[in-house]
Amino acid sequence: MISEPFALGNSPLHRCDPRIRLVSAAVYSFVVALSHEFQALAAALVLSMVLLSLARLQVREIFKRLAVVNGLVVLLWLVIPFTFPGEALFRIGPLHASRQAIVLAAQITLKSNAILLAFIALVATMPLATLGHALNQLRVPDKIVHLLLMTYRYVFVLDQEYQRLMRAVKIRGFQPATNLHTYRTYAYVVGMLFVRAAERAERVQQAMLCRGFKRKFYCLQEFKAGRGGVIFSLLMSAALLGIVAIELRTAL
Amino acid sequence: MTAGKTLISLIGVSFSYPGGQPVLRNLDFNLNSGDRVGIIAPNGSGKTTLFHLIMGLLKPLSGRIEIFGKAVREENDFAEVRRRIGLLFQDADDQLFSPTVLEDVAFGPLNLGKPKDEAIAIARRTLTFLGLSGFEDRITFKLSGGEKRLVSLATVLAMEPEVLLLDEPGNGLDVRTRAALVEILRGLDQSYILISHELDFITATTNTVYTMQNGKIRTDQELSVHQHVHAHPIGSCPHEHCTPEDAHRAEPPLITEK
């Protein structure tokens, strides 16, 4: 299930106003995604590392996350060099790898890692509930925020129901195999999960009605930017402007 | 509230789920202020349905429901009912939907239009009253079963209801949490109706116990829970007693052996 290994902590970054962190992460992602020059991307990667060190997170957990994204990146390295047109650098049998394609794959690798690391440092360091409230304060529509929070709340209940169903199936000797019985059993489990989710939703709504729910949610958390927040946003802005400057200077 | 005032009154209420057998048939029931009524009856006899009818979550097919002396029919009538009557759901996971405990407990008061500071103050006070201070920032779904039940009760009590409907509040709790809950319920000012399958729980928390039969609450037959002591061979092995008289009464057994 979902675990939040980075959410709790007492680093300077954990204490920074979540709204500032969210906005920083969003702006940072745009800057990195739109940059092409290797110097700018390298600078961005360095910035990500600095942010990570500020957040004081477990290195092992970070590598676990990186492994997931880079699995995808490896796949890109297997495909892009041989499918993207450009001047040939080397050949493997009938395939030839183009220089432009390798540059592109390298850019994607740098960008995705830099953005992921920044998100781990800035966004994964807040509990999901805080993320929801921060988004709400940043004027993200109520409906989206509540979808996020309710999903997060009930994903665990649904997981428990799934485990309960699977246990019920297993204790009666079910062994998955490649046959119709297996497919039918899984279909029943999934179908039952939908039925239970729908019933659960109805009961939750009833409970909310009983407590006077008027289609409006209230946020109790107060966010304060404080001096640390101001300093952080100034430094972050300066660093991002630096990356943009490197990009523009090298590009022109 | 003057003593003995009728809070909830059901007159000839019938209900059945679509395509199902009638669950409640011409049911009459009164809850007066100061009453602590226990209902003990087999599964599927309509206890939860009764609560949902009172809260307006279900609508009766026929009959009248009067709450605080006013007939309630439309959704709008029930807005006030829900403010003044608190329903504790059987499954705490249905009741707790906010990420943190404090938010969940403050949800009701906020819906009643209380300002944020006051709602937080009420929530904290309620949590302290239930011995849950320090739980404010806990994540609701990471609580244990007993903690969830107590926090659910806090979410209901935070709305300062005049009447409580408690749907199997003692179910699945360990001995210690159950004892704590009994103490809490005994200390409450509110009148309440409590559904339970557990004889000792229901006798410890209510002063009148009724059963349901054929879709009716048998107010003509007040139950008195009692124990018999007797001895017979191999009596130390787990066993059940069944007399012709008991057979039609179904579970839970009205006679317990100790």
Image (cartoon, helix red, strand yellow):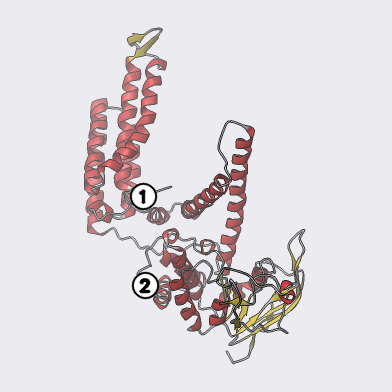
Residue type at tag 1? Glu
Question: Does mark 1 fall on the same chain as mark 2?
Answer: no
Q: Position of residue B224 (x, y in %)?
A: 64, 84
Q: Badge 1, how many Cα within 10 Å: few under 14, some, many 20+?
A: few
Q: Position of residue B257 (x, y in %)?
A: 59, 76
Give the left or right position of residue B14, taking residue A178 as reference. Answer: right
The residue depicted at 60 percent of the width and 36 percent of the height is A182
Q: Which residue is mark 2?
A: B133
Q: Is residue A49 left or right of residue A183?
A: left
Q: Mark yes or no: residue B139 visible.
A: yes
Q: Identify the image quadrant of the C terminus of chain B.
A: bottom right
Q: Chain of mark 2?
A: B
Residue under pointer 1: A4
Residue occupying the far top of the picture? A94
Mark 1 element type: loop
Image quarter for residue B69? bottom right
Quadrant of the rendering where the N terminus of chain B is positioned: bottom right
Check the image and report above or below for B250 versus A150.
Answer: below
Q: Going 73% across and 62% down the picture, which residue do you hit?
A: B17
Query: What whole-number distance in Å separates the C-alpha atoms at marks 2 and 1?
Result: 25 Å
Image coords of residue B136 (percent x, y)? 38, 67
The image quarter in which residue A115 lies: top left
B19 vs A83, nearest the viewer: B19
Q: Amino acid at mark 2?
A: Ser
